[in-house]
Amino acid sequence: MAYYNTNTRSPPPLQHPVPTHPAYIPEPPATPMSPQGYQRYTSSPPVPGPAQTYAQPIPNAGHPSHMSPPYAAAGAYHQPLGPGSPPRQPHPSAVGPGGPVDFSAWGLDNATAAFGMQLGQSAVAAGQEYVQKNLGGFIPISMLKHHFNVSNSYVIKKLRLLLFPWRHRPWSRRVVRLENGQSEWSPPREDINSPDLYIPLMALVTYVLLAALQSGLNSRFHPEILGVTASKALGVVLVDFLFVKAGCYLLNIPGGLSSQVLDVLAYDGYKFVGVIVTLIAGLLHLGNTLYFLVFIYTFLATAFFLLRSLRSMVLPDASATAAAVNPSQRSRRITFLFLVAVSQILYMGLLVRV
């Protein structure tokens, strides 16, 4: 029988190895500059004050660390700076609001991004030059901007005038004197009697959408109805425009071609406001009688508005024209003016049939 020797010394206790950190920790990519102008840092910026030395805690020898490498590395990024370590600098991509943008932070090459921006600017400049060259001679861009110079208050007052024109006074347009001695019409935002192109354009788009909605409620919608309705609306405007321009030419009504083109287009587009009101009455299912009454009222309001608004174009004042209008010419122009107003019932009747 064997006996153990009790005089022998016991072996030393086991010791776990102390984990060590790498000598170099790569700097994580910085967040690019935000649109508000402030910068975000991936690590805490150094706090000004007396330098202090912080000792890194060592895990307990009896409890090994089980942190995953990414988590451990993330904790190492936020270690406070020691007295001998250099101050941490922000990433070069985090530039100030006035500095150039570094596209490398977004994964793009700076040269490629700069070339793309230059190409886009060249395309925009070429488009502006093309529009100015092809449309500038027929319709000046400055005059086109004049007809879109509107405000919210003008739009509300103009819509009220189109629907309730019975007691509006006066109907004459305002004239402003420029510094060089010339005169021009006041912009729409300053004169409610001045024609604009904003309301006709928005009314045309609204009419197409309402027609598509009514077709959908009647289970007749298909994608082609948007193009068909828009083509019909533009065709009605074109026929009305040609009728007015032909009458002005045959009756020898004076006026610049470019200014009258935009003014006539604006007056032709105002009929869509009454058409929209009629379509809304149909969508509310108010009955055929009330629907017919709404249509008659909007037609009369549109016809009366055109009679009073086009009078300054068809029958200008004697002081505004070089040659006086004789009685026979005045009678023909008044007849033409009534024909323009009465013909609106045909155009509006065709537009409300969707």
Image (spheres, rainbow, N blue to C red):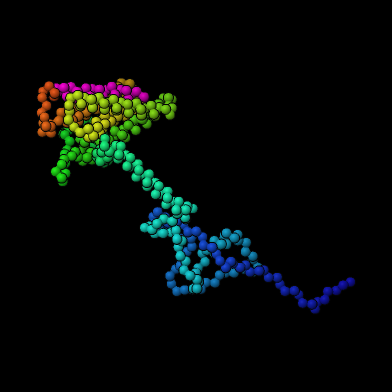
Q: Which quarter of the picture shows residue 314?
A: top left
Give x and y (percent) for residue 292. Answer: 30, 22
Q: Give the range drawn in magenta.
A: 331-354
Image quadrant in which the N terminus is located? bottom right
Q: Position of residue 207 (x, y in %)?
A: 34, 30
State whether the magenta stretch is mostly helix, strand or loop.
helix
Name the residue at 47% across, 64% down: 44
Q: Does the magenta stretch include residue 45?
A: no
Along the line of sight, the residue nearer the viewer: 33 or 246: 246
* Res. 61 image quadrant: bottom right
Q: In the picture shown, does residue 257 fall above or below 128?
A: above
Residue sitting at x 50%, y 73%: 84
Farthest residue, direction right? 1
Q: In this rendered view, identify the residue nearer to me: 195 or 178.
A: 178
Q: Name the spot of residue 328 as percent of width and height, x first.
A: 12, 21
Viewer-proximal residue among 229 and 319: 319
- Say whether residue 217 is visible: no
Residue 215 visible in image = yes
Residue at the location (20% across, 35% down)? 193
- Name which residue lies at 19% across and 38% down: 185
Q: Is residue 343 magenta?
A: yes
Task: Decide: is 56 above or below 185.
Answer: below
Q: Quadrant of the C terminus?
A: top left
Q: Residue 35, how many percent across, how many down?
A: 40, 54
